[in-house]
Image: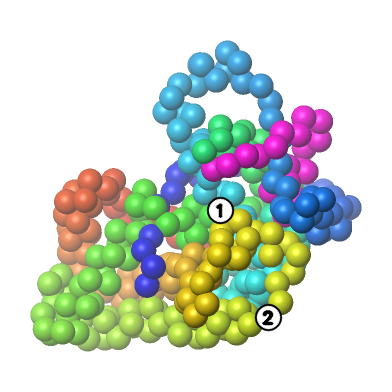
Amino acid sequence: MPRRSSGGLLSSRAASASPTALSIHRGLSAGNDLSANGNLSLVSESQHRGAVQIGTGIGFLMETWLEGYEWVSGLKMLSLDFIHPVYGELGVGIRWEETLRGLARDTLRGRHLEGRPLLLKSGQSDDLSEFYSIQVVALLDLLERALGRKSRLKLEHWVQYIACTENHNPWTVYEDLLTSWASIFRKTRKDEIGFSIDPALIAAELRLARDLDGPRELLSQQRKKFLTAWDFALFSELGLLDIPEGSEFFPFVDGILLAIGMAKFQDFWKWLVSFISSDDLEAVAVAVRKRAQDRDITYCDPARLPLGNGA
């Protein structure tokens, strides 16, 4: 599989419980515009930081830049018509797929707050910090008022702990550790963690969780279809027109499969912790802690892993 990291959750903001169907409708009907040259126009709204930027410090700016980068990446994926056949397996958990797709597109264009549009440049632009602190916050506020707090929490979790592919996502070291453990067990029958129950059962469950043949085939079929104008613009940004004949590479596919794999791994983890003993869980924690230290990754205790229940 392709290889997999994320920041902290946005703090929840008080929101009105009134429905926002009109805002949603405007978002969806606006969600199909492209710039005149056929390329996707990504905009965010900016407020000039001035002294505020100095006061927040480098650490804060780096964190918000990273948050912006991860949200742009996640929302681009959710905005694609291409993902429709596998949307249910992505682990988002929000059944209003088309509504979410429209909101993702409007967020990428900076349409949730009016007044000071600023072109969102490359991924190296400071505008990513502005995008996160303005557009993403507005998106989550709208989502909570329209679809409820659980939908907001589910989207936050998905972007930061499922779609995220960097090592600061605490789930990555657990997935890596248990995948390596299962591989060694299958080859040598050696249980390096030392489970008190049959390790073959755990390895078999994990193998099922990591089986991506179904979604991979669905995405393969999608590649043969015409792309919508929105998708074509985004795919072209990632080199669609430069793919050599016969290449297996296709934009977004690896990221989509990684997200599906992580969603399935988190479902496996929920099964695992309900099945093994507390001593077994501690043995897993010890192994993960050591791996995190060896790789200079921040360790997260099993009890603190974000589960994304939308509670």
Is residue 146 at least partly visible in the picture? no
Mark 1 Cα within 10 Å, few/some/many (few <14, many 20+)? some
Q: What residue did someone put label 1 on?
A: 73
Give the crowd class for mark 2: few <14, some 14-19, many >=20 residues within 10 Å.
few
* Label located before the other in sequence (1 or 2): 1
Q: Residue at x 33, y 73 (%)?
A: 272
Which segment is the magenta one? Answer: 105-123
Quarter of the figure that contains the N terminus? bottom left
185 lies above or below 26: below
Question: Camera-side residue: 152 or 50?
Answer: 50
Q: Are marks 1 and 2 in contact (CB under 8 Å)?
A: no
What secondary structure is marked by label 2? loop
- Which part of the image, by quadrant, shows the C terminus? bottom right
Please provide percent x and percent y for residue 218. 57, 83
- Which one is in front, 249 or 97? 249
Instruction: Look at 39% across and 53% down and name the residue there.
Output: 166
- Residue 146 colored in magenta in the image: no
List x then y, in percent, for residue 100: 71, 60
- Secondary structure under tag 1 reads helix
Q: Is residue 118 magenta?
A: yes
How far is the residue under mark 1 from the one under mark 2?
23 Å
Which mark, residue 225?
2
The answer to whether residue 300 is seen in the rendering is yes
The part of the image, by quadrant, that contains residue 89 is bottom right
Specify whether 242 is left or right of 269: right
The image quarter containing residue 205 is bottom left
Which color scheme is applied?
A: rainbow
Q: Amino acid at mark 1?
A: Ser
Decide if residue 171 is on the left or right side of residue 219.
Answer: left
Vertical relation: 221 (above or below) 288: below
Q: Is residue 253 left or right of residue 3?
A: right
